Image (spheres, rainbow, N blue to C red):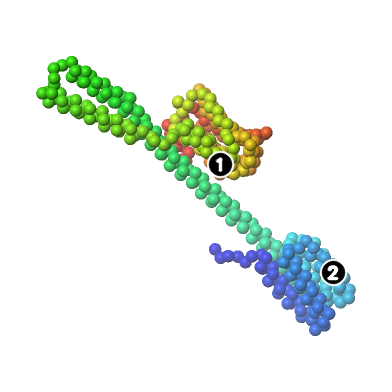
Amino acid sequence: MRALMKPQALLYSVLAILYIMLLRPLEPQVPAVFFLWLIAVTVMIIRLRFQTYRFVWLDVIAMVFLSFWDPKLALLSAPSILLMMASGMFIALPFALLLWGLHGGAIAMLWPWLFALTSGILLYVYKQSTSTSLKHIDTLREKIYTLERTQNHLLEAHHHIERTSALSERDRIANVLHDNLGHDLTGALVALRAYESTQEPTKDNPLFTQIKTRIERAVEQLKATVHQSKVEEPIGLETFESLIEEFSLVSIDFTLEGSINELTMTHWQALVSVLKESLTNIQKHAEPTRVQVSLHVDKKIVRLKVDNDGLGEVKDTRGVGLHYMRKHIASLGGSLSIQRGFLFTLICVIPKTITKDGAYEHLNR
């Protein structure tokens, strides 16, 4: 798309053309007239430099008085009329008619004010159109930025859920191996050794020795496999508490009510994300002296509550982070709300029972 000329630059160009066109009818050979023309140009440059458009009508009134000395000086009001019209000050129209009348009302001398009025209106329309286009472009850029941030949040959540699910599955398999297969193999090995101690020496029995060796080897391999499959990084409450401990702004009062044994990785992923977003917003926008975090688990719901007395947190509650969190929690069948009072409170409620695909529903929309 070809870049459009800025309205301000176009205004400067039209004013320069108009001042040059006024030299001929003003007869600048008269020193006093030329001096007044230079003063008018200087005043206009100062107004454009400091953008004091509100007082440009004073220039027009000054030209009204000067026109009583020399009617031709009324022409110097045309650039001021143009600037008033371009700025949306349509009171310039009666001023132009008045000055034209003071100039004698000749049709041949109407062109300066007609040019000023026409150019001013066109510049005003062009300025409004350009402003509307720029606002539209800014709105589109903001939407693109919001979509990019939302996409990044979704990708981050997707990777986190994938990793959490993989680690959870590894931990589950390790527990099954340890609790079931490990128990049976260890029991078989203990029974075999007990049998060996009550019977005659079995060294000469190669089959017995082979069975014992294989069971011992299987037990050792199972121990190594379970050890390697165990998740080494903190998951769940450990991650949740580490966020609280790492918050450096103020000390956080944390309370836990209820049993967390039945919470799944989906619960912890959502709770950790909400807590991280809330603490980040507190650090960016608030200056609290006290922050409280409470996690309550009962038979049907999990409730996370974050309070702070800074009251400056999240000036726009429609921010991308909170908007994404609301969608995320809603996809799990829960809700996220904000309350303002003596404290700024964020409340997240998640049902205790979540379907297996509930955590991924919002990613596939």
Label 2: state its secondary structure: helix
Q: Which residue is mark 2?
A: 62
Circle 2 packing at 10 Å, graded few (<14), some (14-19), many (20+), is few
Give the quadrant of residue 69. bottom right
**Residue 331 in sight from this viewpoint:** no
Amino acid marked by disc 2: Ala
Instruction: For mark 1, give the secondary structure.
Output: helix
Image location (x, y in percent) of residue 208: 15, 23
Q: Which residue is mark 1?
A: 280
Residue at 33% across / 33% down in the picture? 227
Residue 89: x, y in percent? 77, 61
Q: Quadrant of the N terminus?
A: bottom right
Above-or-below relation of 211 to 77: above
Residue 225: which quarter of the image?
top left
Counting from the top left corner in percent of width and height, residue 188 is at 24, 21
Residue found at x 56% / y 38%: 278
- Horizontally, residue 231 falls left or right of residue 128, namely left
